[in-house]
Image (spheres, rainbow, N blue to C red):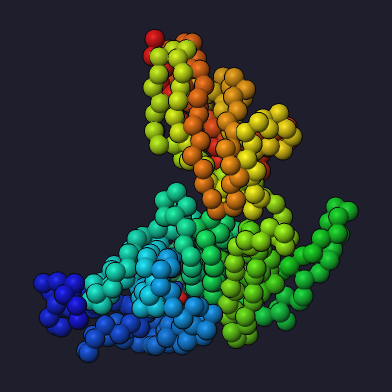
Amino acid sequence: MSENSGPDANPRSLLARIRALDPWFHDIDLGPELKTKLGPCADEPSDHPKPTWELLKPYLPADLSGQSVLDVGCNAGFYSFEAKRLGANRVLGVDVQRREIAQARLAAQILGLDVTFQRTSVYDLSIADVGQFDLVLALGLLYHCRHPLLALERLFEVTRGTLIVESAVAPEEWTGPPQARSIGGLVRRLVPAFYIENDPDAAEAVYNWFLPSPASLAALLRGVGFGGVTHVAVSEQRSLFVCTRNADARSDTRVKSYKARLVAREAVVSTPASDVIAFTVRVWNLGTATWEASIGREEERGAVLLGVHLLDAAENVLEWDFRRYRGALSRTVRPGEWIDMEVRLTAPKSAGQYLLELDLVREFEGWFEDVGGTPLKVDLDVRG
Ligand SMILES: C[S@@+](CC[C@H](N)C(=O)[O-])C[C@H]1O[C@@H](n2cnc3c(N)ncnc32)[C@H](O)[C@@H]1O
């Protein structure tokens, strides 16, 4: 037991703290007489997730030295601790449930392992808040997600290297194979998945919402941007997916997507009327398309540039494409990279409270918001 175990390090008081957080879903060895799990929990056997860890290990590097790991839906932290033991330098576990995070923090303290746990939903993960990780684990998570595509998009955003998904899946005999069908005159490949209709009187902390077939989950993973998706059938109803971002643009067959996240250092910009407004915006490329440098290409069709709309404080548009301002990229920005851009333009001539709405544009083709992006709003205080 490490000195991190603190003043309550005697086994009886530690056991009392463990029991106060019952029931445990994870069987974690915390020391002699310190059992986390007392029996099967939520249909998983008493030793869960030890057998799953043995299945998973061959797909992980034997040594995670120098790597960062994010464990999403970490529960009491079993996999986060194993990643730390494989040498990972930064390990973050997130889970939506408060008690599970309390369990994980207590286990980390008793084990003396430097792993951070925070209560965060998969839907709230962002590159701006947590950064990107070499290895992301999403084990036993996806079927609990009511918004599976949003969850996968967020997982893509925070993955620098590899994502490993472990999930319940519908056997192919339930769904049949993918089929080409004509929809509105276009022939498309349809891959089936199930929505689970929960009983009105069901009472679970986290429901099951979605049961993909292996083919549909692989298609969804490709659809959010993963270049390499390898399916491993663990059993008839469980599968692993090992997914990588595709670094080699030449062999990249993914649909090109344009998606950005914009973050300003200042929440409010204040300036005299008609003076120059200057502030910096950090812009992440979260899509699958590479943005080429655009200085000197401001008039070129398809060039990626920064533009601004002027809104009043109630968010009514005062001037769309304000002053036709364009900020150009000083260098190429690949998927997963960010660039700081300085915005410089002349403030409105009337004093008042405004909003600047910043968005990227593919020149003469369309704003990023039109393909599902979220522009950044910055408060603008113009003094008289
Ligand atoms: C079946 S357990 C799997 C736990 C662990 N990853 C494992 O494989 O043993 C699912 C976990 O996902 C968490 N979870 C459910 N919805 C979530 C969400 N939206 N964001 C983050 N975690 C979530 C639950 O609280 C639970 O701890």
Would residue 377 be found to the left or right of residue 37 on screen? right
Residue 227 in the image: x percent, y percent?
65, 64
Would residue 347 be found to the left or right of residue 36 on screen? right
Q: Residue at x 43, y 20 (%)?
A: 353
Residue 204 in the image: x percent, y percent?
44, 69
Quadrant position of the C terminus in the picture: top left
Ligand 1 is located in which of the four quadrants?
Answer: bottom left
The relative height of residue 221 versus residue 307 in the rendered view (above or below) is below
Residue 240 placement: quadrant: bottom right
Specify the farthest residue to the bottom: 32
Q: Residue at x 14, y 71 (%)?
A: 6
Q: Residue at x 62, y 33 (%)?
A: 295
Quadrant position of the N terminus in the picture: bottom left
The mark total stands at: 0
Q: Residue at x 58, y 73 (%)?
A: 242
The relative height of residue 72 versus residue 40 in the rendered view (above or below) is above
Residue 176 placement: quadrant: bottom right
Tell which of 248 and 204 is nearer to you: 248
Would residue 23 be found to the left or right of residue 191 on screen? left
Q: Is residue 131 visible?
A: yes
Q: Is residue 167 visible?
A: no
Residue 215 in the image: x percent, y percent?
70, 72
Tell which of 357 and 41 is nearer to you: 357
Would residue 267 be found to the left or right of residue 171 on screen? left
Specify the farthest residue to the right: 185
The relative height of residue 98 versus residue 272 in the rendered view (above or below) is below
Residue 91 in the image: x percent, y percent?
38, 67
